[in-house]
Amino acid sequence: MHRYEKRNLPVDKVRRFLEPGPIVLVSSKWKGATNIMTMGWHMVMGFEPSLIGCYIWEENHSFEMLRTSKECVINIPTEDIAAKVVGIGNSSGRDIDKFKKFRLTAAPGKKVKAPLIAECYANFECRLADSSLINRYSLFVWEVVKAHAASSPRYPRTIHYRGDGVFMLSDGNTSRYRRLFKSQNL
Amino acid sequence: MHRYEKRNLPVDKVRRFLEPGPIVLVSSKWKGATNIMTMGWHMVMGFEPSLIGCYIWEENHSFEMLRTSKECVINIPTEDIAAKVVGIGNSSGRDIDKFKKFRLTAAPGKKVKAPLIAECYANFECRLADSSLINRYSLFVWEVVKAHAASSPRYPRTIHYRGDGVFMLSDGNTSRYRRLFKSQNL
């Protein structure tokens, strides 16, 4: 299993990895216990501050840990750990220690206590920016306060969930259309 | 340019096409004028009702048309029209008729007045379900009230924006991990 070498990524650049819509792993820590959940419903909501909206169902064990600790790390897994991503989604942190069960490495964050998953391509440390939409929409609005990403490979082979057990794989990237963009729209 | 043959898609199944995170085209109609915008910041927010959150910047010409008409169509383009998707994002409906300029076909909806884009793989007719987050977050919460999707090809070659003029292409889909899912999680 690969542990990516990572560098600092400016927080306003996390869209590079989130806007294409991959499944992500959300890690949390509360009262000494850690947890991980698999999550597909998220969106970029701003650059400055760098805001990410995440739908987190109240039945998830992570829900209360995230709401109470007001912190998380959004981790971007790649295809090599797809089976673990599914396993994490199948199981509950009520019953197991997911870092141990799935042999993932909890690395310390710089700004939050929630752990980074070392085997993921990128890790975005987040603080809860707005809790007011949780009750109505299960919507957590996070601010990315520190971001780390590998630089090799340049484009990670991310996995994108369709439902029904089918993943779309990121299998190609192109700058072919770049010349068509107005520069202010890049 | 391809015009897809489409069938009815149950509205709770639109995640198949939105959750993987493609760039979409949002079409609108107000006072006889139509418009199209390119949009990458969206998320699934529920199955029943079928809710989609979309970030729509107030500077976009579509913003007032959408807020006032309370309707839109979310269209899923494929790679064959990627250059048009970029062109639509580069230009404003204040200056041009985008259906005409980009030679796209406005097809009538079943439940909304906003037009479907015939050259897109799927079209989701939406009504505004919640306008209360528009001022704070530019967040439109839409309910999909009617959905149409092609059945061939089974998996469309969608385009996913990374910023900086780079698109990730959907180039592979796999059911390889399906057997790992708990059935209730599919």
Image: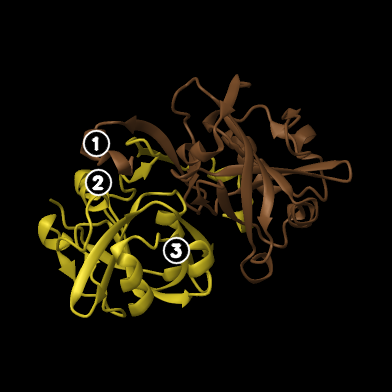
Chain colours: A yellow, B brown
Q: CA distance from mark 1 to mark 3?
A: 30 Å
Q: Nearer the viewer, residue B75 or B83?
A: B75
Q: Amino acid at mark 1?
A: Tyr
Work out whether B35 lies above or below A48: above
Question: Do marks 3 and 2 both belong to one polypeptide chain?
Answer: yes
Q: Chain of mark 2?
A: A
Q: Quadrant of the N terminus of chain B?
A: top right
Residue wearing tag 2: A86
Q: Is residue B16 above or below residue A48?
A: above
Q: Which of the marked residues, 3 or 2, is nearer the chain's N terminus?
A: 3
Check residue A13 in the rendering and tell me which mark sits there, or answer none. 3
> Which residue carries the number 1 mark?
B177
Q: State how far apart marks 3 and 2 are (Cα).
A: 27 Å
Q: Marks 2 and 1: CB-CB under 8 Å? A: yes
Q: Residue at x 36, y 35 (%)?
A: A164
Q: Is residue A3 above or below residue B184?
A: below
**Amino acid type, mark 3:** Lys
* Vertical placement of residue A66 versus B98, above or below: below
Image coordinates of residue A8 in percent, x first then y, are: 32, 70
Location of residue A49 in the rendering, given as x and y in whole percent from the top left corner: 51, 74
Q: Chain of mark 3?
A: A
Q: Look at the numbered disc 3 and give the secondary structure of its residue.
A: helix
The answer for how far apart the CA atoms under marks 2 and 1 are is 8 Å
Of A53 and B70, which appears nearest the observer?
B70
Label 1 CA crowd tier, 10 Å (few <14, some 14–19, many 20+): some
Query: What amino acid is labelled 2 in the image?
Result: Val
